[in-house]
Amino acid sequence: MFLKQKKGAEKQFYMMAELLFAAVVILAFFFFVSSKISDTTLEKNYVARDIALLMEAIYAAPGQLEYTYPVGYDFSIRIAASGITVWDDKGNAHYWYSHDNAVVHEPGEFVFAFKGNKKEIKFIKKNEQLLITCSGCSRTALK
């Protein structure tokens, strides 16, 4: 009779331990997700990859091209031959693209810092030269 009671108590102990473990895992997952909601890493990575893909398409396009890229975030964007870097006060994301040496950047390497309502980057390709301008941003040319 004593052994049967001990087996029941052991099962209850294991069930309580499993419930406690499940509660800890659920709480840890909740805190992880809530910390990532305010993080902008995914958006910065998306913008860097999107602009890099756009640069590849511009280089591959024959003839003249004009494209306006809307920027929906208050990020700073650096466009250089080494790649695209997007950052804010929480961190940065970098993505490279295949730089075409036949296409000349005007002025070469530069940084856009976006603030305000209307934010966009304009890419203009004419005669194997790529002019990149922006609106709703402050532009800094790096030499």
Image (spheres, rainbow, N blue to C red):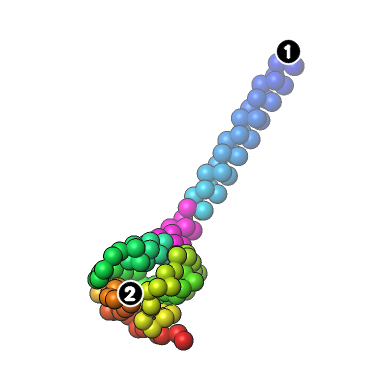
Q: Which image quadrant is residue 141 in? A: bottom left
Q: Is residue 70 left or right of residue 28?
A: left
What residue is drawn where x is 66% and y is 21%?
8
Q: Secondary structure at mark 2?
A: loop
What residue is drawn where x is 45% and y is 65%?
98
**Label number found at residue 103:** none
Q: Is residue 40 visible?
A: no
On the image, the x and y values in percent for residue 132 come to 32, 77
From the image, give the main secondary structure of the stretch colored magenta. Answer: helix
Mark 1–mark 2 distance (CA, rounded to whole Å) = 92 Å
Name the one closer to the observer, 135 or 96: 96
Q: Is residue 37 magenta?
A: yes
Q: Is residue 135 magenta?
A: no
- Residue 50 sits above or below residue 104 on the image: above
Viewer-side label of 1, 2: 2
Say which quadrant the N terminus sits in.
top right
Q: Is residue 22 left or right of residue 99?
A: right
Where does the magenta region start and end? 33-47
Q: Which residue is mark 1?
A: 1
Name the one closer to the observer, 97 or 19: 97
Q: Which residue is mark 2?
A: 128
Mark 1 is surrounded, within 10 Å at the Cα level, by few (under 14), some (14 to 19) or many (20 or more) other residues, namely few
What residue is drawn where x is 47% and y is 65%?
96
